[in-house]
């Protein structure tokens, strides 16, 4: 059985928000958002959209 793991790394891109479509990335295992000025409320939204994903801010 092949288990695909996907990693997205938009580090240091001045990202402040993300679309709700981000939640469609069900196989995403890591979303590395370090170095982006993301507000606490947006971080909570992202965590809720991707509950099984590791998200270092």
Image (tube, rainbow, N blue to C red):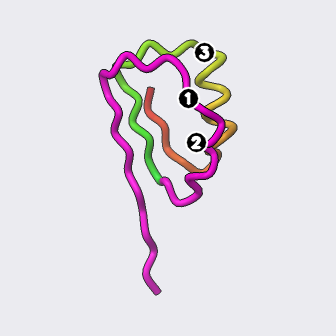
- C-alpha distance separating marks 2 and 3: 17 Å
Q: Position of residue 39 (x, y in %)?
A: 56, 12
Residue at the disc numbered 3: 40
Question: CB under 8 Å between callouts 2 and 1?
Answer: yes
Q: Using the image, determine if residue 12 lies above or below residue 7.
A: above
Q: Nearer the viewer, mark 2 or mark 3?
A: 2
- The CA distance from mark 3 to mark 1 is 13 Å
Looking at the image, is mark 3 or mark 1 earlier in the sequence?
Answer: 1
The quadrant the C terminus occupies is top left
| Region rendered in magenta | 1-28
Where 55 falls versus 30 (above or below)? above
Snapshot quadrant of residue 10:
top left
Judging by the rendered image, the residue that carries numbered circle 1 is: 18
The prevailing secondary structure element of the residues shown in magenta is loop
Q: Residue at x 49, y 54 (%)?
A: 28
Measured from the top left, where is residue 3 in percent x and y?
Answer: 45, 74
**Residue 34 in the image: above or below residue 14:** below
Mark carried by residue 22: 2
Name which residue lies at 52% across and 60% down. Answer: 27
Q: Report whether 15 appears left or right of 27.
A: left
Question: Which x, y percent locates residue 26?
Answer: 59, 57
In front here: 16 or 7? 16
The quadrant where residue 18 appears = top right
């Amino acid at each position: 059985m092949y288990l695909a793991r996907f990693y997205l790394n938009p580090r240091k891109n001045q990202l402040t928000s993300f679309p709700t479509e981000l939640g469609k990335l069900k196989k995403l295992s890591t979303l590395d958002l370090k170095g982006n000025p993301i507000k606490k409320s947006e971080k909570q939204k992202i965590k809720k959209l991707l509950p099984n994903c590791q998200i270092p801010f």
